Image: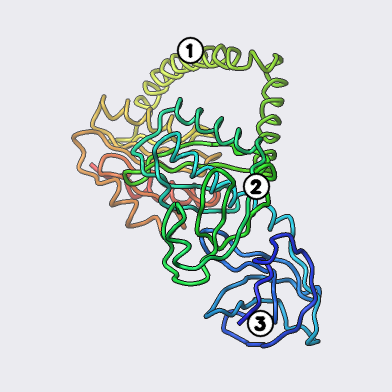
Amino acid sequence: MTKKLYYESAYIREWETRVTRKMEREDGAYVALEETAFYPHGGGQPCDLGWIDAIPVLDVVLEEGEILHKVERFPEKEAVNCRLDWDRRFDHMQHHSGQHLLSAMCLEVCQAETLSFHLGQDYATIDVARADLPQHELMMLELEVNDQIYLNRKVTSYFVSRERAAELPLVKQPKVTEDIRIVEIEGIEYNACGGTHVSATGEIGMIKLLRAEKQKGHTRLYFKCGYRALREFNAGMDILGSLSARFNTGKEEILDRIAKWDQEQKQLQAELNAVKAENDAYLAEKLQANRQGSLIQHVFADKPLKDMQNLAAKLAEQADVILLFASKSEHKVLLARGVGDGLACGAFFKQYLADYRGKGGGSDKMAQAGFANAEDAMAFYRFAAQSLSGHV
C-alpha cells in the first residue's frame, strides 16, 4: 500500500522516499514508492508527471491500493528524490476545483445536474442533464461562477465514515463504503472526490465558458480555468490584433470591416464567374472545332479541377462527345462523356489508374484522378487519349 502524500497536501512538490518495488512490463519499466505525491489517473483527472531522481515519470496508475510509476529507466538507488511537474499539477487543481464550482452553479442557476467530467490537454468539459442551454443562461452561469471565485471561498478535503457521509448533503452518494474523501467548497457544496484541489476558489483564477453543444440528449460545456483561460484570451487578442492590422482598422470596427470585405469579395467572385463563363463559351467552340471524332482532348497549364469539370459539363450538354482534360499544375486528369455515349468513365479509371500511380474515381458520366507528379499525370493522359481515340 502506497502512502498518498497528495491527500495530506496537494501542494507538496518535492520529497524524499524509497523504492519498494521494480517491475518490467511489456509497455515499459514501473516502480512503486513508499510514499508518493504523484496523482494517478482517476475521476476524470489525468495523472501527474515529473521526475524520480531526474528520471522522467511517463505515467502513473493505481492498482489495488499501490501506485505504480512508469519511468524511462529504473533508478540506480533505493533512496530517491521525487519532484512534480508543478505547472501540470496546478493546472489540474485549477480545473478540477473549477469543475466542482461550475457544476454546483450549473445545478443552482440552470437546474442541470452534471453527468460526467473530462479534463483534456486542450480543454475541459462537463456533460449536464439539459437538452440545451440558451445563450442568456450560459452568460448568467459564467457570471455567477466567477462571482464565487472572487469571493475566495475556502476549499477543504477530509475523510469521513459511511454514516457521516450519509448525513452530508452530497451531490452524489459514493460507491465506496469506508474512508470516504469529501471535498467541501465553503457555503457551496459537499462532494465525494479523490482528486487534487486548490485551497480556495480564488486560486482557480477564472472560468471561461468556450461553447456548448448537444451531446446524446444532453449538453456538453467546454471551459478553461486559470492560466489556460488566460492563454486562451491572449491567443484571441493576438488574432484580433492581426485582423486589426490586416484591415487597418480599430478592434471595435473589425466586424463591420469584415462584412464590407465579404461583400466586396462576393462582387468580385460574381464578376470572375461571368468572365469564366464567357471564356468557357469561347474555349468550348474552339475545342469543338478541333475535335477528333467523338474525342475532345486538351492539356491546360494551370486550370483548376473544378473549372475543368464545369467546362466538361458544358460541352457534354451540347454534343455526344468524350472529353479528356489534364491540368499540369495540379497533376489532375478528367474524363467525361455526353449523354448518348456508352463509355463508363469511372470504370475506365478504376481499371487503369493503378498502372500510373494515380488515385481517383467517379461515376459513369465523369471521373477525375490525381497523381504524385506531372509526369505520371501526362503519361496517363496520353494513354487515355490513345485508348479512347477510336471510341465511337
Disc 2 element: loop
10 left or right of 255? right
Are the residues at dot 1 and dot 2 in contact (C-beta closer than 8 Å)? no
Asked whether 168 or 278 is in front, the reply is 168
Decide: is 21 above or below 287: below
Q: Which quadrant: the C terminus?
A: top left
Q: CA distance from mark 1 to mark 2?
A: 64 Å
What number is the disc on residue 271? 1
Of labels 1 and 2, earlier in sequence is 2
Q: Which residue is mark 2?
A: 154
Q: Residue placed at 73% from the left, 67% from the top? A: 50
What number is the disc on residue 18? none
Decide: is 355 above or below 245: below
Residue 30, given in percent of the width and then of the height, sits at 64, 81
Asked whether 290 or 235 is in front, the reply is 235
Q: CA distance from mark 1 to mark 3?
A: 71 Å
Q: Which residue is mark 3?
A: 32
Q: Nearer the viewer, mark 1 or mark 2?
A: 2
307 left or right of 392? right
Q: Amino acid at mark 2?
A: Lys
Residue 127, given in percent of the width and then of the height, sits at 43, 47
Q: Residue placed at 36% from the left, 24% from the top? A: 289
CA neighbours of label 1 inside 10 A, class few (<14), some (14 to 19), many (20+): few
Residue 65, quarter of picture: bottom right
Of labels 1 and 3, earlier in sequence is 3
Of labels 3 and 2, earlier in sequence is 3
